[in-house]
Amino acid sequence: MREETKCFLFGEAACCTAEKQGALGARPPGQLGQHQERLCLSPLSRQTELCIPAGAHPPAGVALAMAFVWLAVFLVPVSGLLPPDHDSYPIEISDPDPPIKNLRMDPERKRLTWDLHGNVSEITCFINSKPFTKARKGTYCNISDLSCQVTNYSVTVTKGQPFSAWLQYPRQEGNPWAAAENLTCWVHDVDFVTCRWAVGRQAPRDVQYNLYLENLDSYEKWPCSQYRADEQGTNVQCRFHNISVLSKDQTRFLVNGTSSGSKIPCSETSDKLAKIVFFSPLEVLAAPQITSRWCNQSYSFMRWQVRSHLNDDFKYELQIQKGMELAYKQEIYKAFLELNNPGTYTVQVRARDATFSHYKPWGPWSVPQHFVCEEGARLPAWLTSLLIALGTLLSTGLALLFCRFLVTQKLFPPIPHMKDHINGKLQNGRTMTWDPDQDSQEECPVVEVQVLGET
């Protein structure tokens, strides 16, 4: 028979478990019986809990663990067990009238709430010992994202009577080592999301995993439709074909497990998508697409574009080889390349996110582009077509203007001006011959003639 002792932390309590294993092996964790003893110590209350069968003596492993924990309790002050931003003060767990009672989780409203007693001016809420918000109205804290994994939630009076309370939510169900491990997700080829995970190290043989993508803004959830399984038929990878359902504020990738004999805890990764993209290589950019290119003996030009639903700031790397020379690389931030006196060369381009670019992966290379820029080289077909179209439009416009001028002259001929016989000059300085004997197309009868003078 072999004895094995394990120690672990449970909230604010330290627990040690001793198991005696025989031919049939150890009992499942959490079951106390003839072959298992547990010691639990709460450092803040200086209280211990020892669970052993009646009439049995604690094994050597538990006794040694008990001595070690007690030594740690007396050597470490209580203030060292509090969050670092607190003053050093004792917490009276056995307070008959504590300021915070009935600490509980309201999953529907996503609130950590409690009953408040006494005069307390400020309460801070913590998640896994990290402060995340101040209490509202002194009675609750909003939690935007409730994790499916066991999480420690605590509240502490930061201004007023010193007090702290905590709970774990949700309750642990099943073996945590049976959950999917190393869940990783990334975006690739513009529109695709792929997630990969490993089978839990203590998962049962019939375990099966299913992945869901959840928009935490709208609370919509989409199951995976394309899995890849391992040799045992267990799903270990999923691909989504539509990235547009991802929320830029909150997105969750959730893996649930099922088994016929036991419950399997979940695994998840969730955060603001902008933060995920900012600090991790969530997206592998697709190869740039060449949109235009041309060259002549003295100048060459190439433009490209990169598509992405998550990024709009890119960094590019060019690989250029001129003639038989060795290829060299160049990093730029503009989406085009200009070269003077280019000659003959080949170029490729790839892209990555420019934000903290040293931590982001490069995408694949584009298709190599080969340029032969000789004297008298033709313009590219698209540029030739554009110039022809512009010339045609210009010719048509000039023809229309000329026709309009001719029609205007015929419809509105110039009005003749009479000669001033007194001064011998033409009115308005304009000259036009008028033959009174010539028939005109329109008769203008004279109604009255007034004689101004005689010469």
Image (spheres, rainbow, N blue to C red):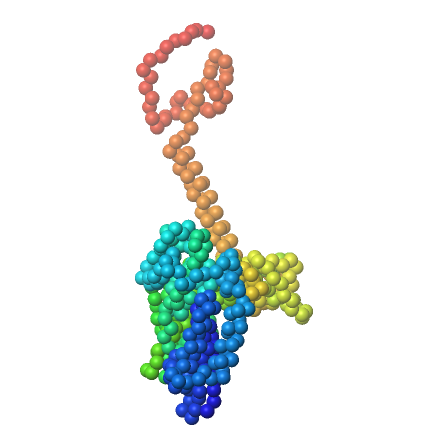
Of the pair 288 and 61, the residue shown nearer to us: 61
Q: Is residue 307 above or below residue 403?
A: below
Farthest front residue in view:
55
Farthest top residue in view:
454
Expressed as whole percent of the image width and height from the top left, the position of residue 324 reads 67, 70
Residue 203 appears in the rendering = no
The residue under the point 35% across, 78% down is: 263
The residue under the point 38% across, 73% down is: 172
Q: How many marks?
A: 0
Quarter where residue 139 is shown: bottom left
The residue under the point 39% across, 31% down is: 412
Farthest right residue in view:
325
Farthest bottom residue in view:
23
Of the pair 446 and 223, the residue shown nearer to us: 223
Residue 419 appears in the rendering = yes
Quarter where residue 115 is shown: bottom left
Expressed as whole percent of the image width and height from the top left, the position of residue 160 reads 44, 52
Of the pair 276 and 177, the residue shown nearer to us: 177
The residue under the point 32% across, 15% down is: 447
Expressed as whole percent of the image width and height from the top left, the position of residue 168 reads 39, 67
Expressed as whole percent of the image width and height from the top left, the position of residue 210 reads 37, 75
Q: Is residue 112 above or below residue 430?
A: below
